[in-house]
Image (cartoon, rainbow, N blue to C red):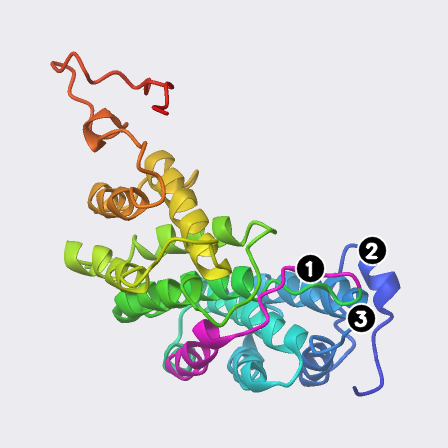
Amino acid sequence: MPSTQVDWPSTAAAGFPFPGRVPVRRLADELSAMLVSPDPTVRDDHAYTALARWTGEGHLDELLVDIGDAAATRFTHPEIQARSFAALALARVLDRVKAVPWAAAEDAADRWYGAFAEWFPAELDTRGWDDTLGWLHAVAHGADAAAALAAVLPSRGSALLDLCARRMTAEAAGHRYVQLEDARLARAITAILFTPGLSVDEATGWLDTVTRAFADAEPGPVPPWAFNTFTTLQSLHLHLVLGLADRGTPPHAEAVTTRIVTILRAPLPWLAQPSLLPGWRNASDPLSSPVVNDTIAP
């Protein structure tokens, strides 16, 4: 890592005022190097927090494409924290591109999508937390990047939904979601479902990937990938019923939840019929109470 030109502890303590005396390119290079660090204070508390703040405030606009390109190259880095925080850094760059669009950055987003699509469903280290490295959260960070990519590249909406499906059903992943990765994926999928022009077939088609994953399921212990998929679908159902606080429910939410319930009936056969669920209630139907019978048959 290049020698620092910023007193990071003091900068953090002061709330990350932008160090205007440091050349912007030098600062961007320093942040990129710090985002690889195995030290969570350097990587997360200092570099990522500064990058998120200064990118959002527009201080790094002149190098936004360079910062995004540097993040995309780190998807093949040998260390997990570098790969995971590449996704989080890219999400913040894309947020800025969406807020202040210009052609060069939008064209670069296609390059970033290609690198992301290679990495996200294939990442093997899906730990949320490590006692030495701190937050890793490749699934959660990747979910954030997927939602940010959809906002900038709406033509990729359907493909990004399928990437999320491939991520949750990845059989090679050996870790269960225990740090709310399911909720971050559900939030991302919900956000992607707002993509303009997304047809009902595109909004639900990614669930074919999930259905195929369970096609050969047999009785026995639930493997991590199946657990991850079930918890993500349950979380997504909640997101689609309640909606996002700032956006409500996306188009085709009912069609997606119908498919989700169909999939969840396999491990959860005691679920009520869709006609009893919020969103399908018919005021003239005496059986349309929002309260589901809590008696479970033996």
Residue at 87 percent across and 70 percent down: it is 7
The label number, if any, that marks residue 129 in the structure image: 1
Give the mark toward the camera: 2 or 1.
1
Of pointers 3 and 1, the one earlier in the residue sequence: 3
Residue 116: image x %, image y %? 45, 77
Q: Which residue is mark 2?
A: 14
Q: Is residue 135 magenta?
A: no
On the rendered structure, is 212 left or right of 66? left
Q: Which residue is mark 3?
A: 39
Q: Is residue 112 magenta?
A: yes
Mark 3–mark 1 distance (CA, rounded to whole Å): 13 Å
Which span of residues is magenta-colored?
A: 110-131
Residue 95: image x %, image y %? 48, 63
- The front one of 125 and 49 is 125
- The front one of 43 and 238 is 238
Identify residue type, mark 2.
Ala
Residue 190: image x %, image y %? 36, 50
Residue at 67 percent across and 73 percent down: it is 81
* Residue 91, placed above or below residue 86: above
